[in-house]
Image (cartoon, helix red, strand yellow):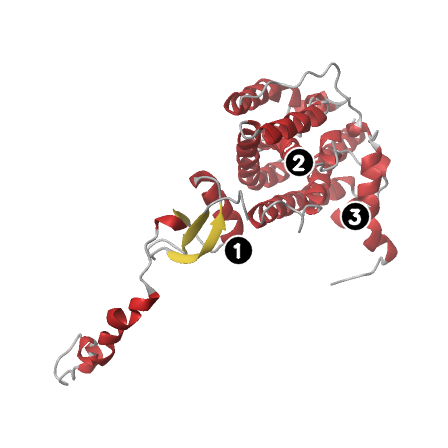
């Protein structure tokens, strides 16, 4: 039981860290390519916020795991199947509208999740969440403003935002999925019940859609699997770029 | 460029008790977006605790051509500086 719980705690910290790491890397791809200087800096700021969270969560995963892997080892020396991020964060950036749609759906969820984690008995997770919640509050607000601005903007901006939301909406259900063995983790005070976040998320998203004059995308069935390592082909390409340098030059330092 | 967002001037208060200082400008469609843009561009390294943004079009500037009559007359009025006056040795706390 003790070992099972320990393994589940590692998986939980990896989920938190990998979500942040992969989305942070995705946002970094915008650097120098965003529509305006202001947006370029905002996306880079978001990315760096997330990489910072990833360092803490992955570092903690390594400590609980107890076999000497630090955050860098976990970020740069695991293969696709060992990543535990949700499918939403690994989705390609697409155009700016699709990036903002992904950000809004994720940050709205991450905000609620971090807010819940703040009062967790596991103080290490709670302390990271406390720092993250302010960052993510801003991410959710700014991306929500772009949902409204593009959704309620020109014909073209609306078309792009509708397409961006439709692309990402398939991966929403996975955010609220509860993994096998996770009930024990929740009972022991190491995680929160993610399914319970859904009503608040629905309300927050619907409120922004109402301001934007947008409808919820119609999706028949969600796609899932990222939490157990079944990823889209996109993650492999992302890791190839992200992990190249530390794999080719293992002892490289600044 | 056509269709570019309007320009806003950004003022940052470095800490409470100090005045807001002009730090630069940004482009934004509205005031909320201007505050967010100013936050992202000018306060990334803990530069401030408060922001002001003002539409650049709302600022009235003095005409550079008037610089002569506006500013040069002050040049020979050194008596307007407190250092012009000699303070007697027996005057304290000044």
Q: Secondary structure at mark 1?
A: loop
Residues behind callouts 3 and 2 on a single chain:
yes
Query: Residue tagged by mark 2?
Result: A99
Query: Residue tagged by mark 3?
Result: A242
Q: Residues within 10 Å of mark 2 (few under 14, many from 20)?
A: many
Q: Nearer the viewer, residue A95 or A209?
A: A95
Label 3 or label 2, whichever comes before in sequence order: 2
Q: Are marks 3 and 1 in contact (CB under 8 Å)?
A: no
Q: Are marks 3 and 2 in contact (CB under 8 Å)?
A: no
The Cα atoms of the two marked residues, 3 and 2, are separated by 19 Å
Determine the residue positioned at 62% across, 32% down. Answer: A110
Query: Residue tagged by mark 1?
Result: B45
Q: Is residue A137 above or below residue A251?
A: above
Give the percent coordinates (x, y) of residue A229: 83, 31
Q: Secondary structure at mark 2?
A: helix
Give the percent coordinates (x, y) of residue A24: 68, 43
Determine the residue positioned at 33% across, 58% down. Answer: B61
The Cα atoms of the two marked residues, 3 and 1, are separated by 26 Å
Q: Is residue B77 above or below residue A205?
A: below
Give the percent coordinates (x, y) of residue A199: 58, 17
Q: Nearer the viewer, residue A105 or B88?
A: A105
Q: Is residue A121 visible?
A: no
Q: Is residue B25 visible?
A: yes
């Amino acid at each position: 039981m003790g070992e099972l719980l320990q393994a589940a705690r590692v998986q939980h910290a990896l989920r938190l860290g990998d979500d942040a790491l992969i989305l942070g890397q995705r946002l970094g791809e915008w650097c120098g390519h965003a529509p305006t200087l202001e947006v370029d800096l905002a996306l880079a700021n978001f990315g760096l916020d997330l990489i910072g969270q990833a360092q803490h969560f992955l570092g903690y995963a390594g400590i609980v795991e107890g076999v000497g892997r630090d955050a860098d080892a976990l970020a740069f020396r695991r293969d696709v199947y060992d990543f535990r991020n949700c499918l939403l964060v690994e989705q390609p950036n697409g155009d700016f509208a699709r990036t903002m749609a992904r950000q809004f759906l994720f940050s709205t969820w991450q905000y609620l999740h971090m807010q819940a984690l703040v009062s967790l008995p596991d103080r290490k997770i709670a302390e990271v969440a406390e720092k993250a919640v302010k960052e993510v509050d801003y991410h959710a607000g700014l991306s929500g403003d772009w949902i409204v601005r593009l959704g309620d903007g020109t014909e073209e901006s609306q078309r792009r935002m509708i397409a961006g939301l439709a692309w990402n909406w398939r991966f929403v259900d996975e955010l609220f999925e509860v993994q096998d063995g996770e009930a024990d983790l929740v009972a022991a005070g190491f995680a929160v019940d993610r399914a319970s976040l859904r009503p608040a998320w629905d309300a927050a998203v619907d409120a922004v859609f109402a301001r934007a004059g947008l409808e919820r995308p119609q999706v028949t069935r969600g796609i899932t699997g990222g939490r157990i390592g079944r990823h889209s082909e996109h993650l492999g390409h992302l890791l190839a770029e992200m992990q190249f340098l530390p794999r080719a030059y293992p002892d490289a330092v600044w | 460029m056509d269709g570019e967002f309007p320009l806003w001037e950004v003022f940052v208060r470095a800490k409470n008790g100090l005045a807001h200082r002009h730090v630069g400008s940004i482009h934004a469609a509205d005031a909320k977006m201007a505050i967010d843009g100013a936050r992202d561009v000018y306060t990334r390294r803990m530069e401030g605790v408060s922001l002001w943004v003002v539409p650049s079009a709302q600022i009235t500037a003095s005409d550079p051509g008037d610089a002569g009559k506006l500013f040069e007359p002050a040049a020979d009025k050194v008596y307007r500086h407190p250092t012009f006056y000699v303070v007697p040795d027996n005057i304290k706390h000044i």
